[in-house]
Amino acid sequence: MGERVAIARAAQLLGIKRGDIQRLVHDGELEAFEGKVELEALTRRFPRLAFRGPNTVERARLIRAGAFARRVSQVVAPDTDTLENQLRRRNAELSVQKARAKAYYAIIDQLLCHLGEMSACEQGERLKLVEELNQWLLQRLPE
């Protein structure tokens, strides 16, 4: 299957009326699929009209690709200043989260030390509870 163009665009490229192409499709002289016709079939049917040279399809493809890239960069990609501001904000957020994580690890270390001290002094049910809690924490902490 070759390159397809909309019937309206094909008529524009050929310099004829859209109704002429639609009539050919209706009469079965030209195939169309979902409102599009193959460029190759058009060049066979209209060899002397507006298509000039074998590079027309490739040129159209390049123009389309360039237009899409420009559109994406205009709509999606923010400018450099915006990206720098976003990066600074993310770095600041990361620093805050690292500081929090460090503080939480310090608290957990202190808790483990305290539980160790309690297990040396306690007896009976409280000792069993302290040891269970200590094991529970150790199992869940990353190494």
Image (cartoon, rainbow, N blue to C red):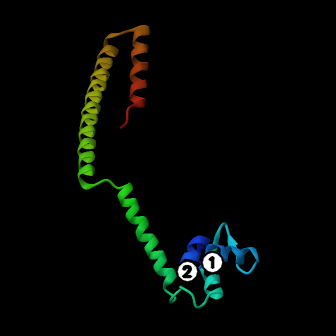
Crowd band around label 2 with a 10 angstrom C-alpha radius: few (<14), some (14–19), many (20+):
few
Residue behind mark 1: 38
Q: Which residue does the image show at 42% across and 30% down from the upper left?
A: 139
Q: Return the x and y of residue 58 as percentages of the image width and height.
A: 49, 81
Above or below residue 97? Residue 116 is: above
Q: CA distance from mark 2 to mark 1?
A: 16 Å
Quarter of the image for residue 91 reads top left
Indicate left or right for 22 with 53 as reference: right
Q: Mark 1 is on which residue type? A: Glu
Above or below residue 48? Residue 89 is: above
Above or below residue 16? Residue 107 is: above
Indicate left or right for 3 with 103 as reference: right
Give the total of numbered labels. 2
Are the residues flagged by discs 2 and 1 in contact, CB closer than 8 Å?
no
Q: Return the x and y of residue 75 as percentages of the image width and height.
A: 38, 55
Mark 2 or mark 1, which is nearer to you? 2
- Location of the C terminus (image quadrant): top left
Quarter of the image for residue 38 reads bottom right
> Of residues 122 and 102, which is closer to you in this image?
102
Indicate left or right for 17 with 114 as reference: right
Q: Return the x and y of residue 134 as percentages of the image width and height.
A: 38, 22
Q: Which residue does the image show at 32% across and 14% down from the upper left?
A: 118
> Of residues 28 and 141, which is closer to you in this image?
28
Q: Return the x and y of residue 50 as percentages of the image width and height.
A: 53, 85
Crowd band around label 1 with a 10 angstrom C-alpha radius: few (<14), some (14–19), many (20+):
some
Q: Which mark is residue 15?
A: 2
Secondary structure beneath dot 2 equals loop
Q: Mark 2 is on which residue type? A: Gly
> Of residues 107 and 133, which is closer to you in this image?
107
> Of residues 96 and 26, which is closer to you in this image?
26
- Location of the N terminus (image quadrant): bottom right
